[in-house]
Image (cartoon, rainbow, N blue to C red):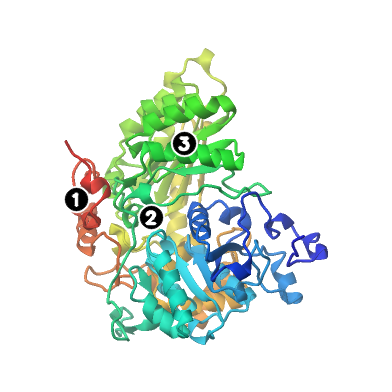
């Protein structure tokens, strides 16, 4: 019988005790005495969110294939358990063994979005690990960060011993072997970090110094030790079929966000949307073979008992064997009661035909992401989607039996005008009109429902818009009100619904996305004053953050509303993400000229990703 870290009394007093007990199907259990390294893999959010993250499942499976490593899972305790752990002095623990995280060799934290930064400090705090890397002792775990937010690690630099930049499949084995060798030779924590800093993709913040100019911009960012690289290249899996995938995914006891088997069909994207960080940092596009995907589809459905399989990628329609894969999945699994989910599809005749086969039309809605309300602004952001294509797709869908459509937009994009804002309502109206034009009265099942929602634009590192200024909270809301008022003028307003995101959260996200090391003090102060689960609307408290900025004498406007000069040194410039700064600057200028750049399969734009010698850059163009 496993001994649990939490007593029955505590488990009975909190929501969803299954978040904390482990024991799920396919959980990996090893004897601590039989392994050389214990690795705590943390997703700094609630269990249901973390267990839905594909990258964490891939690394968990990969690490545990090594006999000398035991990888266990850790999540942020929810707000009901957090005070109880502090009150009863219960240290944060891993699910598999229920042992304290502080006893592990590594604490690996995946950083998927900026609004989880205070949760990272919660994890360290509850684990009894000093928040600052410089204060950690020899016996403390090595704290390592990875994920998309590691492409600007500076707002978190004081809290991490090292960051892994890029895809985890390539260098972790070397890192673990180095750790074992260092320990066997009696090396210190610092000896290991010095060795790790020599591995590709590894960034040790303590070995770099930052100097600032009087205007607050960065003067220099340089190594402070001999032999430490000035620039760090991202790690990338070139041959996707050579990378391990999940053979036996963990099956949670409770319903999680992605309660299904997830099949990753490709990484990267050919589209080149200028606002999209993922589309740049994961370049070039690389595909799994059809045979590889067939094998893992069988394996994962068999080992989990799940009744749904979902295809994962940034743009599934660009997978070159999509038709063959979907045909295989339908023929093999749909007759066995397995549902097939196809997110990230462009709405065209093939996609609609596929969806009509795999979905219950009455229960589904279709999603379009025009991102901008006018063609001019879609050209600025290089969306590559025309109004004609949107309306044609909607017409085909309505004729096929759909009557619900979701439209996603952004407000506050560079060069945006009132016409662009009002264009959101006008485009939603045109989609509704298309329904009434295309579907005869006797064939309609109620009214059409068109839901439009707008997020607010955040310029991200390694995008052509990294130089752009952000709107203030007031400007964001003013733009949302313009759109809202325009919706009220529409003839089909009863069929239309409009919503928009939280402006305060967006502004904070902008600071954390492009921040430097000085922002770390603000994150720490906000955490000390009670900030936690900032990505959850019911827990976000903007006043805490504004007070933290004031107390730390940091002006958030410096990171948000200020447009950058082309030659400014960014906090993330020491990272080579594959796309060159020259390419991004060229795309920034093309955006201002409202010029579209062809996608990677149409024409190479010279972004720099060819240096990886694989993927779409080397596809046979004949």
Q: Is residue 96 above or below residue 387?
A: below
Which element is circle 3 on?
A: loop
- Res 337 → quadrant: top right
Locate the N terminus and report the quarter of the image it occupies.
bottom right
Which element is circle 2 on?
A: loop
In front: label 2 or label 1? 1
Q: Is residue 394 above or below residue 537?
A: above
Residue contact at pointers 3 and 1, CB within 8 angstroms: no
Q: Write down the residue under mark 3.
A: 342
Q: Position of residue 309 (x, y in %)?
A: 52, 38
Q: Position of residue 119 (x, y in %)?
A: 57, 68
**Disc on the earlier residue, 3 or 1:** 3
Mark 2 closeness class: few <14, some 14–19, many ≥20 residues within 10 Å: many
Q: Is residue 444 above or below residue 185?
A: above
Q: Name the foreground residue: 502 vs 282.
A: 282
**Disc on the earlier residue, 3 or 2:** 3
Q: Write down the residue under mark 1.
A: 605
Q: Position of residue 209 (x, y in %)?
A: 34, 84
Locate the C terminus and report the quarter of the image it occupies.
top left
Marks 2 and 1, how far apart at CA: 26 Å
**Disc on the earlier residue, 2 or 1:** 2
Residue contact at pointers 2 and 1, CB within 8 angstroms: no
In front: label 3 or label 2? 3
**Residue at (38% x, 65% y) in the render:** 171
Mark 1 closeness class: few <14, some 14–19, many ≥20 residues within 10 Å: some
**Residue at (47% x, 30% y) in the render:** 329
Marks 3 and 2, how far apart at CA: 30 Å
> In this orientation, does residue 556 appear?
no
């Amino acid at each position: 019988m496993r001994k649990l870290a939490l007593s029955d009394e505590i488990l009975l007093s909190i929501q969803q005790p299954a978040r904390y007990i482990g024991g799920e199907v396919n959980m990996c259990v090893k004897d601590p005495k039989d392994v050389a390294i214990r690795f705590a893999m943390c997703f700094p959010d609630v269990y249901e969110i973390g267990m839905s993250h594909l990258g964490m499942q891939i690394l968990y499976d990969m690490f545990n294939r090594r006999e000398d490593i035991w990888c266990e899972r850790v999540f942020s305790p929810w707000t009901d358990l957090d005070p109880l752990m502090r009150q009863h002095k219960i240290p944060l623990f891993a699910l598999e063994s229920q042992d304290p995280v502080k006893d592990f060799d590594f604490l690996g934290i995946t950083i998927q979005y900026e609004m989880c930064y205070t949760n990272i400090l919660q994890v360290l705090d509850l684990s009894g690990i000093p928040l600052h890397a410089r204060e950690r002792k020899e016996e403390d775990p090595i704290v390592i960060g990875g994920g998309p937010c590691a492409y600007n690690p500076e707002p978190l630099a004081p809290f991490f011993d090292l960051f892994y930049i890029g895809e985890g499949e390539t260098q972790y084995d070397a890192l673990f072997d180095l750790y074992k060798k260092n320990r066997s030779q009696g090396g210190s924590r610092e000896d290991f970090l010095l060795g790790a800093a020599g591995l590709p993709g590894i960034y040790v913040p303590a070995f770099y110094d930052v100097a600032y100019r009087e205007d607050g911009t960065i003067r220099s960012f340089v190594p402070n030790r001999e032999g430490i690289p000035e620039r760090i290249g991202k790690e990338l899996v070139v041959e996707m079929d050579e990378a391990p995938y999940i053979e036996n995914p963990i099956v949670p006891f409770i319903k999680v966000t992605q309660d299904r088997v997830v099949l990753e069909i490709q990484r990267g994207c050919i589209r080149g949307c200028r606002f999209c960080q993922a589309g740049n940092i994961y370049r070039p596009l690389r595909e799994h073979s059809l045979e590889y995907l067939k094998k893992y589809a069988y394996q994962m459905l068999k080992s989990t008992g799940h009744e749904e399989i979902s295809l994962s990628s940034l743009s599934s329609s660009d997978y070159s064997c999509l038709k063959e894969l979907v045909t295989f999945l339908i023929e093999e699994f749909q007759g066995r009661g397995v549902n097939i989910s196809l997110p990230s599809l462009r709405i065209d005749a093939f996609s609609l035909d596929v969806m009509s086969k795999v979905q219950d039309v009455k229960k589904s809605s279709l999603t379009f992401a025009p991102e901008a309300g006018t063609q001019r602004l879609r050209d600025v952001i290089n969306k590559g989607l025309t109004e004609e294509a949107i309306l044609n797709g909607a017409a085909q869908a309505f004729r096929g039996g759909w009557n619900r459509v979701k439209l996603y937009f952004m407000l506050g994009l560079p060069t945006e005008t009132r016409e662009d804002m009002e264009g959101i309502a006008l485009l939603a109206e045109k989609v509704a009109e298309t329904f009434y034009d295309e579907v005869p009265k006797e064939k309609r099942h109620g009214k059409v429902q068109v839901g439009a929602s707008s997020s607010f634009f955040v310029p991200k590192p390694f995008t052509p818009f990294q130089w752009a200024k952000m709107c203030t909270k007031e400007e964001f809301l003013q733009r949302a009100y313009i759109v809202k008022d325009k919706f009220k003028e529409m003839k089909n307003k009863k069929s239309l619904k409009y919503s928009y995101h939280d402006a305060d959260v967006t502004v904070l996200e902008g600071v954390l996305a492009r921040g430097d090391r000085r922002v770390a003090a603000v994150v720490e102060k906000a955490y000390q004053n009670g900030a936690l689960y900032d990505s959850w609307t019911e827990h976000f408290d903007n006043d805490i953050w504004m007070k933290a900025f004031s107390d730390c004498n940091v002006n958030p406007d410096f990171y948000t509303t200020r447009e950058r000069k082309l030659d400014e040194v960014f906090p993330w410039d020491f990272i080579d993400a594959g796309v060159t700064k020259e390419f991004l600057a060229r795309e920034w200028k093309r955006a201002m000229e409202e010029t579209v750049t062809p996608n990677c399969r149409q024409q190479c734009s010279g972004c720099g990703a060819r240096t990886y010698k694989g993927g779409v850059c080397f596809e046979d163009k004949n």
